[in-house]
Image (spheres, rainbow, N blue to C red):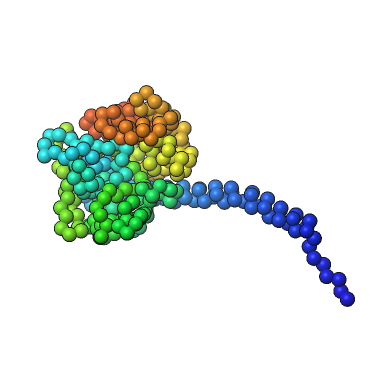
Amino acid sequence: MKNRHAFTLVELLVVIGIIALLVGILLPTLGKARAAAARAACLSNLRELSTALRQYSIENKDACPIGGIAASPATDDYTAEPGLQFGFTTTVYWKGSSGEGIGGLGFLAYSGLLKSPKAFYCPSETDPQFMFDTRDGPDGTINPWVFNIKGEVNFGTITHQNVRLAYVSRPIAAYTPVATQPRNKVVPVIISPKPPYVRSFPRFAKLKNMAIIADLNNSPVDLNRRHKTGINVAYANASAQFVPMKAFEKAQYGGKLWKTLGRDDWISLSYGADSENYVLWNPRPTKLTGFGVWNLMDDYSK
């Protein structure tokens, strides 16, 4: 009779140990590869958005839809500039005390120039508030996508609420959300500029080499949730690049370095004249003062 050979217990344990060792070596490498791929996809999204902004400007008399929605109560005084939530230009549909309507990059989504709405969202994001079409419950109360049809904003059966993108645009202009709402369709009305108050889109030609769209960057909390070591940034000159954390080391707010800011700080950072270290307040920033995060992005591209 032929002898049958089988693995001994020791041999099995050795094989299992080798497999475990290989898994331990490969998993971090695979994790880094996935992170690198997501970061590359994010950068590709920003390039696509930058291209779409240029196309939008060509079709709309050089207007570039960046900036944010005024969160303060609306006013009928056209000589008064609406207040802007500086750190929250990620909000593209606003419902609040200042009214309800589209602002900033929401007009780009409304125009239908991008093939996929996912281009507005970073694949590395983990917070549902800044992810694509996230829902919670029967009426979808987190972050619904409402720009599915060109020229319409459609909430369907969902309660009207704030809609956010995963990217922030340069806080260069504020818009009071003005809209008419026949059924579920929203027709935005852009407020005409009244010099020296910037009430409409900035001109694309004047943006030159400025950073115009970026990953969330209100505080290090935002960076740690995505690419860990920096952010992706798109410029008006059609370039896009990864800007490392070290580029923000000089950024300040109220005497505190940006890298030490916590959530309470960046919530304060988002409002009114206190944001002078973040952006130039008067009349509206085309250039920045102090060591604001946006002018440091500009400097890094030089």
- Count the labels in the image: 0
Instruction: State whether residue 273 appears in this view.
Output: yes
Q: Residue furthest top?
A: 255
Residue sitting at x 71%, y 56%: 16
> What is the x, y in percent for residue 86?
29, 36
- Given residues 220 and 204, the one toward you in this image is 220
Residue drawn 33% across the image and 48% down it: 165
Q: Nearer the viewer, residue 64 or 161?
A: 161
Q: Is residue 189 left or right of residue 253?
A: left
Does residue 302 appear left or right of residue 113 in this picture?
Answer: right
Query: To which quarter of the image does residue 168 belong?
Result: top left
Report whether 23 appears left or right of 247: right
Q: Do we see residue 61 in this rendering?
A: no
Give the residue at x 52% y 51%.
Answer: 34
Q: Quadrant of the N terminus?
A: bottom right
Task: Where is residue 288? Give x, y as percent.
Answer: 31, 30
Residue at the outermost bottom position:
1
- The answer to whether residue 152 is above or below residue 253 is below
Q: Position of residue 177 (x, y in %)?
A: 20, 45
Question: Vertically, is 39 above or below 283?
Answer: below
Residue at 24% x, 53% y: name it.
160
Up-down: is 287 above or below 68? above
